Amino acid sequence: MPQDMVDWLRPTFLLRTGLEVALSGLFARFADKRELEAGLPSDPAAEPGAPIPYADRTFRDEDGVLWFDYASDVGEGFDPTYTVAWLLAQPSLSIGGERQRHHTKRGRFLVLGGDQVYPSASWDAYRDRFVGPYRAALPFTKSDNPHVYAIPGNHDWYDGLTSFMRLFSQPSWIGAWRTRQRRSYFALRLSEKWWLWATDIQFDTYMDGPQLDYFRGKRRDLRDGHRVILATAKPSWVGAHGNGETGLKREGSWEVLSYIEEELIGGKTGARVAVTITGDKHHYSRYQRGVPGRPKHRITAGGGGAHTSATHDLERFIHLRPHGSDASVCYERFGTSPTPEQSRAMRPVALRRIAREHPLGWLIGAIYAVLAVLMADGIKDQDTGLESELLGGSFFSLLVDSGTVWNLGLIMLLLFGLRTFARRGKLSKAKAWLFATVHTLAHVLPAIALTLLALLLFEGWGWAGEKGVLLGWVAAALLFMVGFSYGSLVFAVYLGLANMNNALQHATEIYGGLASTDYKNFLRFRLDPNEQLTIYPVGIRTCPRWEVSKRDAGESDPWFEPHPTEPEATLIEAPIRVDPG
């Protein structure tokens, strides 16, 4: 069944996801499924008589060109996921502007760069959010069935990689796409000079022993002049620093990635990484090292179907310290989708949605209501059942009487919770406390004032004054409605102010709350007989709605048709050409 976009700020989802993250991180340290992969075959499964590797002529078109595709973060909402799958499934795509069109062909294989399912991995989630859309987009081909490979992202790891291994690591079909790999990582020979390596970094932890042995074995096949496309599950160069120790067994994805690039691939082999591709961030961005004659590209292309994330928080220049080097290397940012201007324009739209209609207001309203009940319980006589009369008095006397260990504890719990929430970005400890304190006061002070005013007002009503139990609960009902509207507004204002203070602060919550299906993307690669690699960054500005096709469809026709029009594939930036020399 077609699935809606994930509601990332829904309270029940936040609780469930937090529990899954905690459990998966705990068990991943004690039961790393990658260790079990050592007993599996090390190379992709081959059909009888099928040539491997992809350097074989049978995988190339009539011009001797090898085409292959890359998409990442694909399995969230049906419309964007199916839009990308539908474009990937087309036998050919013409992309570009009015002056120049580039005619591309469907890849002989597709690499999925992580997070094939949201919000967490399970067999049902894979079936509904990934397998279903891709099977419907390309149900059958008469010949030249494309292959599919995948590496896991953090969401794929939430069930310990069980569903991922069941789907991708044994011979099976996803529509007309054929799975080929046996492990969660792999290396593919593309030509005489080109390779594609894809790694599994789990939760940014160190590289496991079997995987390290696997790539050390592949390293022996590298020669001077070989070039490698390296696929990883996270753009670890964003936020990395130009100083600091880099080590294989040190946790952190940049340390692992740098070791792979400089030691396993580079070093004495004479080979080097020419392009690093990743997803995780649901946008397109490219950083390039400006060394004359030897550019190096780091591309994030996580727009395969998940909600759009921000780009205005990306630095123009980043400085990275490679493994084994004392000097940092500068990379400059080039194309992005959405553009920084478009990214900023999405922020107020997201904040308005969070303030007006987001279900997170139910949780905020409930906190206000509990505070009102606890205050009423503190004001009334010593009966803890809220059944006796409330004490008469002024506003300030009621304020003093309302203080109990329970409502003070609730306020402190809220403060520490909001402080932990504030630390999700790049805030210092002191600034996180400041933001959390102001945020807490913005909720608590109006809630206290309105509760006391409500109790004073309701106590004058004879029917309520005779039954003190009603005072607390009537005030709680009023405060629930206030919390749902005013509290949601305060939360949205906090998110906006924090994000304007630091563009990394709460960007995930803001753009996840918007759940935009715009600005999707994938990469199409062209490797010609002269060993020149061309990368086409394909963008989709808007995704149409898809409905079950009402036409008499053949066995190879897609199952859904777009409304109102077909999606349009464009170039995010000019094709990126990489000369192996």
Image: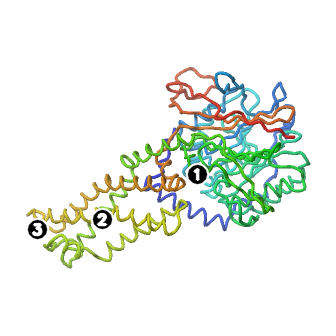
Measure the C-alpha gap from mark 1 to mark 3.
Answer: 55 Å
Q: In front: 58, or 128? A: 58
Q: Earlier in the sequence, mark 1 or mark 3?
A: 1
Give yes or no for contact between labels 1 and 3 (Cβ–Cβ under 8 Å). Answer: no
What amino acid is at disc 2?
Leu
For the residues carrying marks 2 and 1, which lies nearer the camera in this image?
Answer: 2
Instruction: Judge whether 250 appears above or below 238 on screen.
Output: below
Rendered residue at 53%/66% (across/down): 428
Q: Residues within 10 Å of mark 2 (few under 14, many from 20)?
A: few
Instruction: Name the quadrant of the C terminus.
Output: top right
Circle 3 residue: 466
Instruction: Judge whether 110 appears above or below 210 on screen.
Output: above
When asked about the image quadrant of residue 404, the answer is bottom left
- Identify the mark at residue 516; answer none if there is no mark: none
Circle 1 residue: 122
Element at label 3: loop
Rendered residue at 83%/25% (across/down): 63
Q: In front: 359, or 292? A: 292
Where does residue 423 sit, x and y in percent of width and height? 51, 64
The reply to whether residue 161 is visible in this rendering is yes
Where does residue 327 sit, x and y in percent of width and height? 77, 60
When asked about the image quadrant of residue 34, the answer is bottom right
Q: Earlier in the sequence, mark 2 or mark 1?
A: 1
Q: Earlier in the sequence, mark 2 or mark 3?
A: 2
Circle 2 residue: 445
Element at label 1: loop
What amino acid is at disc 3?
Glu
Q: Residues within 10 Å of mark 1 (few under 14, many from 20)?
A: many
